[in-house]
Amino acid sequence: MTHVSSTQTIPQAGEVPRHVAIIMDGNGRWAHQRGLPRFAGHQRGVEAVRRIVRACSDRGVGYLTLFAFSSENWRRPAEEVALLMQLFIAALTNEVRKLHRNRVRLRVIGDITRFDAKIQALIASGEQLTAANTALTLTIAANYGGRWDILQALARLCREQPGAAAAGLHETQLAPYLSMAYAPEPDLFIRTGGEQRVSNFLLWHLAYTELYFTDRLWPDFDAEALETAFAWYRGRERRFGRTSEQLESAALTPGQVAQAAGRG
Ligand code: IPE
Ligand code: IPE
Ligand code: MG
């Protein structure tokens, strides 16, 4: 089922974010600071992934989306790309059963046709094994680009509904074709590693997401750091275009505000 866009519903205040999306950045710098090869940082980054998946499960987060490899990361030295692919294979081979035991549902978004057949097969079997799990949905963005996602959605829409564009497109028509149509839009975006940019991550989905940037390098990111981000999130007032007064008005429940804004 596709959720109503989070730009149109007001999530309950004070809650743990329902959907957390993270740009896991800073592995290379973490390694460099220690005189280690970049790959050592990526290896430690996998440990951080394990910690954060567990922490999000424990905290009752519904959806965790992790940017693992961008469509631009192919530009890195061939050796680093190859090592990242090996790490991806190892993680898919070793972690999926554990995810399944913890009732985590695994999804991968991105143009996976660019990966070799072995990776594509591991993705397919991991998704299949965990498809019915109802705890955390863990989405790995691999060879993902936000612009690619919008374009592939538009292409599929035009293929399946040839007359749609001529009739005047609405957001809700495109949304089901985006690669994360199964999830509500992210409530909280986190980027580690100090950069304050989106780097072609979830361009469509971040329209009203709260953006949190931390200098902490990804291999050092832990449950406590996540909790700090959640505390910051709880302090935000998500107005979605309205005024504070409107939101504070006791007469308007979040549902009514959404209705007043006109859904769909
Ligand atoms: C993020 O860490 C991991 C990937 C992009 C695969 P980086 O490798 O970008 O680390 P820095 O930014 O060089 O420190
Ligand atoms: C973004 O990190 C992509 C991932 C974390 C997978 P980068 O390190 O590649 O981002 P830029 O290129 O510095 O913006
Ligand atoms: Mg980086």
Image (tube, grey):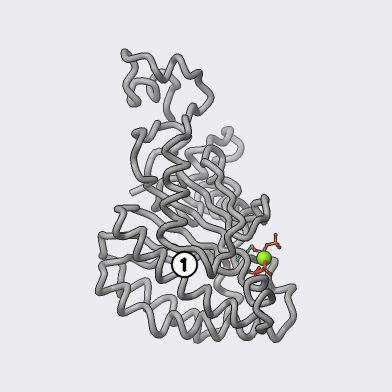
Snapshot quadrant of residue 82: bottom right
> Is residue 189 depicted above or below 241 in this figure?
below
Which residue position is annotated with label 1? 108
* Mark 1 residue crowding within 10 angstroms, few (<14) / some (14–19) / many (20+): many
Asked if the beta carbon under badge 1 is closer than 8 A to the nearest atom of ligand 2, the reply is no
Q: Nearer the viewer, residue 168 or 248?
A: 248
SS class, disc 1? strand
In the picture, which quadrant includes the C terminus?
Answer: top left
> Could you tell whether 60 is left or right of 76 in the image?
left
> Could you tell whether 101 is left or right of 213 in the image?
left
Residue plotted at (62% across, 56% down): 215
> Is residue 32 depicted above or below 25 in this figure?
below
Q: Can you tell me which quadrant of the image ligand 2 is in?
A: bottom right
Identity of the amino acid at label 1?
Answer: Val
Q: Residue 130's spot in the image, x, y percent?
A: 30, 70
Q: How many marks?
A: 1
Q: Residue 227's spot in the image, x, y percent?
A: 41, 52
Snapshot quadrant of residue 245: top left
Q: Residue 36's spot in the image, x, y percent?
A: 66, 83
Q: Nearer the viewer, residue 170 or 67?
A: 67
Residue plotted at (53% across, 73% down): 45
Q: Nearer the viewer, residue 105 or 210?
A: 210
Residue plotted at (41% across, 64% down): 52
Q: Residue 38's spot in the image, x, y percent?
A: 66, 79
Q: Residue furthest front?
A: 34
Residue plotted at (52% across, 67% down): 220
